[in-house]
């Protein structure tokens, strides 16, 4: 299978307001641009653009530049005298270097290209002369004086020898004072007919000391005539660095207010825009269920609260791209999305979910049960103690969605969820053991049935042959103890059964019959908890969902086509019991098929049993009881009893197989034990033959330990039965 490549979401600020305006910043940016264009600043002016980290400040500044460039290209008169430039302070360190770098950038950006090159050449030679662009030269001079090496130390120190540095120092000593040179720059800017906009972005990336240095520069030597600064920052970070936090009433005080003369806030993105951005950035996920209630709850209680800024969306999209590439088809995608959001935006809750596996999953217990309510309550209290009341109110609805089996634990009023546990298992939610394990290990457990198998089995286009392959794969898959996981596979299908259409149900039924004997062999001694029980239950579900008419048609075709006597006999016995044709204790009667269909199935089965007996292939079956039961019900009582007697006396292996219809099983920490749980039915069993077989084969050398234990249990059970018979009064004559 070829995996489709995915691309991480791009965190680069957008620059095209006409094509990249996902969040509606274009109109806002255009209005800022218009305000900057029409305003004059004879004494200089500082505009602040405030927004939290990742809110889109850089995109807005890029859009402003785009509008300026467009208007200039269109020949608008109000931008003819405008020049704009960017200053990136975070690539410069130190107060002196910061101011020097600023004036160097200013000198490089103003004037035409030829003058800039000439100015730089003069600067490199250590001779600052007033050229054709006096403003450029004045700015260069200020930068030169602040950084007395003329830039050699900060830009080209490695290429400048000691002699050059000495010459630069001597030249600096002969230059006019900084104050005088700065005054010349101010006067020239006042006299010019040009205006300048200086964009300084990402101020909140700087250290506190660097923030203070930059803002001091803007307030002092950077406050220039006809120069408007547009500063971009997170207010809380910058105000804190300056020693004056923004009060809750929105006012500003102290030093910060004296620097920034007008502040604009980045508009809050619309929820629709952020959700559209999320949709575009996520990997290819299957659509949410058509009912959509759970997805809407996730949106309202979680995603719309977590995703406040564009960068929040980018972070979540990139996290999901990575996680889904590893977990695709092994867990519910929207549970993964929710868990990744919790990991990014509610870390305390995520750590608690990771550290409380047993409390959340209740492994080995039925839905909604727990071993110790006090333990569960203590775990919930531990989570609550780490969160504020507001945080708890926000996160609890999400936890109820993710862990519907723990609604009561998270304060649910009714103590149960509107989502069925079958639905949780079918989508392999984080609340299931395989889903939880897959997410926190970033891979499915080697001891879990792959979710993709069950998903494929539920599709209408999956043919019978592929259904058989999937069952075979599940039979071969083993848990930590070496037992087959085919029973778990059948349970996964049971939870999905209501979603299967008729073609899928028929193909699955055919495959279940085709592999019935393989499942019997995989059952070992697991009894009602083994895969054979899950196999039996799943067949009943399939027939129930097919309804009597289609179920009868499917079964008639199977009984006609198949030669698997063991599988057909087991299926016939189960159906006959379900409709009451064969009496059985504890069986709920179900009309899986019309009663008139059973004789048709028996008519197809009986000749196949007789033929298999004649060919001596019945002995190869793992279980004999269902064949004997069907044979007797179809009129072959004598033949069935004779066959079982022959198997009892054939060898120890066949005797041990025969015992499966007579022995009960109990298992604890000491191992598995067998016992005769009922007197042998004389219609089935020749007790004398069984007793003789036990004597002959109890010490057969090639028996497995399991087979030897079975034969011993048979011998002991029959011995007890004989003792009871001989101790009865002589006038008490039992029927059998």
Image (tube, helix red, strand yellow):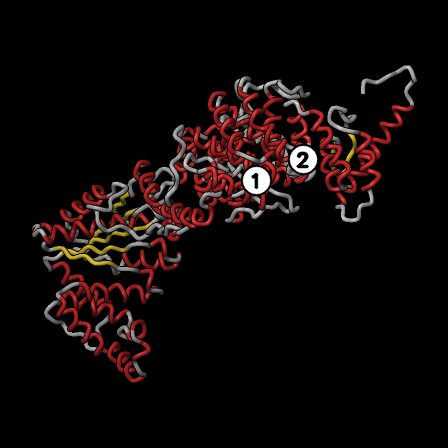
Please give left or right for residue 170 compared with residue 710 in the image: left
Q: Which residue has dot 1 on it?
A: 433
Kindly state the secondary structure of the residue where label 1 is placed.
helix
Q: Residue at x 73, y 32 (%)?
A: 644
Q: Is residue 180 left or right of residue 73?
A: right
Vertical position of residue 106 compared to residue 305: above or below: below
Could you tell me if residue 425 is visible in this image? no
What residue is rendered at 62% in x and 18% in y? 581
The circle on residue 623 is 2
Tell me if residue 545 comes above or below residue 690 in the rendering. above
CA separation in Å, label 1 and label 2: 33 Å
**Does 264 sit left or right of 642 as displayed?**
left
Circle 1 residues within 10 Å: few <14, some 14–19, many ≥20: many
Picture coordinates of residue 401, whole percent (x, y): 48, 32
Name the spot of residue 485 as percent of width and height, x first: 59, 41
Residue 328 in view in this figure: yes
Depth order, front residue of 533/55: 533
């Amino acid at each position: 299978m070829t995996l489709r490549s995915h691309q991480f979401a791009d965190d680069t600020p957008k620059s095209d307001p006409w094509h990249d305006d996902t969040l509606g910043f274009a109109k806002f940016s255009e209005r800022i641009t218009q305000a900057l264009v029409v305003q004059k600043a004879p004494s200089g002016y500082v505009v602040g653009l405030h927004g939290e980290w990742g809110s889109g400040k850089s995109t807005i500044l890029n859009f402003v530049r785009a509008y300026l460039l467009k208007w200039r290209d269109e020949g608008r008169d109000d931008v003819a005298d405008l020049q704009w430039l960017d200053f990136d302070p975070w690539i410069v360190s130190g107060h002196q270097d910061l101011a020097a770098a600023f004036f160097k950038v200013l000198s490089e950006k103003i004037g035409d290209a030829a003058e800039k090159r000439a100015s730089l050449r003069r600067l490199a030679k250590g001779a600052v002369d007033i050229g054709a662009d006096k403003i450029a030269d004045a700015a260069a001079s200020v930068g030169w004086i602040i950084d007395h090496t003329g830039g050699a130390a900060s830009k080209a120190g490695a290429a400048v020898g000691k002699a050059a540095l000495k010459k630069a120092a001597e030249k600096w000593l002969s230059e006019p004072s900084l104050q005088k040179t700065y005054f010349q720059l101010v006067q020239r800017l006042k006299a010019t007919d040009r205006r300048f906009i200086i964009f300084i972005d990402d101020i909140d990336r700087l250290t506190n000391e660097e923030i203070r240095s930059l803002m001091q520069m803007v307030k002092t030597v950077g406050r220039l005539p006809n120069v408007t600064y547009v500063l971009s920052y997170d207010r809380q970070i910058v105000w804190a660095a300056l020693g004056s936090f923004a009060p809750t009433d929105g006012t500003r005080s102290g030093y910060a207010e004296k620097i920034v003369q007008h502040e604009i806030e980045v508009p809050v993105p619309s929820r629709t825009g952020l959700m559209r951005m999320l949709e575009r950035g996520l990997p290819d996920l299957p659509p949410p269920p058509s009912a959509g209630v759970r997805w809407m709850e996730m949106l309202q209680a979680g995603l719309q609260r977590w995703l406040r800024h564009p960068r929040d969306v980018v972070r979540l999209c990139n996290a999901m791209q990575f996680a889904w590439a590893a977990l695709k088809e092994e867990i519910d995608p929207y549970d993964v999305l929710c868990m990744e959001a919790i990991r990014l935006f509610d870390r305390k809750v995520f750590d608690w979910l990771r550290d409380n596996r047993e409390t959340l999953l209740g492994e080995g217990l039925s839905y909604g049960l727990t071993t110790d309510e006090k333990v569960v309550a203590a775990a919930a209290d531990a989570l609550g103690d780490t969160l504020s009341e507001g945080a708890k109110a926000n996160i609890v609805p999400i936890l109820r969605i993710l862990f519907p089996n723990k609604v009561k634990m998270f304060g649910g009023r009714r103590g149960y969820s509107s989502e069925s546990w079958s639905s949780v298992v079918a989508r392999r939610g984080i609340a299931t053991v395989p889903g939880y394990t897959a997410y926190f290990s970033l891979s499915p457990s080697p001891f879990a049935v792959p979710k993709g198998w069950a998903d494929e089995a539920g599709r209408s286009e999956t043919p019978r042959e592929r259904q058989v392959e999937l069952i075979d794969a599940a039979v071969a898959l083993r848990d930590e103890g070496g037992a087959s996981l085919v029973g778990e596979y059948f349970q996964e299908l049971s939870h999905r059964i209501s979603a299967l259409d008729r073609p899928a149900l028929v193909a699955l039924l055919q495959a279940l019959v085709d592999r019935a004997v393989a499942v019997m062999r995989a059952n070992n001694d697991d009894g009602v908890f083994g895969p054979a029980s899950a196999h039996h239950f799943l067949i009943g579900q399939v027939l129930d969902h097919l309804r009597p008419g289609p179920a009868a048609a499917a079964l008639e075709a199977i009984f006609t086509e198949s030669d698997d006597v063991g599988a057909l006999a087991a299926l016939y016995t189960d159906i006959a019991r379900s409709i009451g044709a064969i009496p059985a204790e504890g069986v709920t009667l179900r009309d899986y098929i019309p009663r008139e269909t059973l004789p048709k199935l028996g008519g197809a089965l009986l000749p196949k049993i007789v033929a298999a007996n004649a060919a001596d292939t019945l002995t190869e079956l793992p279980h004999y009881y269902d064949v004997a039961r069907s044979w007797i019900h179809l009129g072959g009582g004598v033949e069935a009893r004779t066959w079982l007697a022959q198997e009892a006396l054939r060898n120890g292996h066949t005797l041990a197989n025969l015992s499966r219809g007579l022995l009960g099983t109990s298992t604890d920490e000491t191992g598995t034990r067998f016992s005769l749980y009922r007197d042998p039915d004389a219609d089935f069993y020749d007790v004398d033959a069984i007793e003789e077989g036990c004597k002959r084969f109890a010490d057969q050398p090639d028996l497995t330990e399991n087979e030897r234990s079975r034969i011993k249990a048979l011998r002991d059970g029959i011995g007890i039965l004989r003792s009871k018979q001989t101790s009865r009064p002589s006038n008490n004559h039992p029927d059998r």
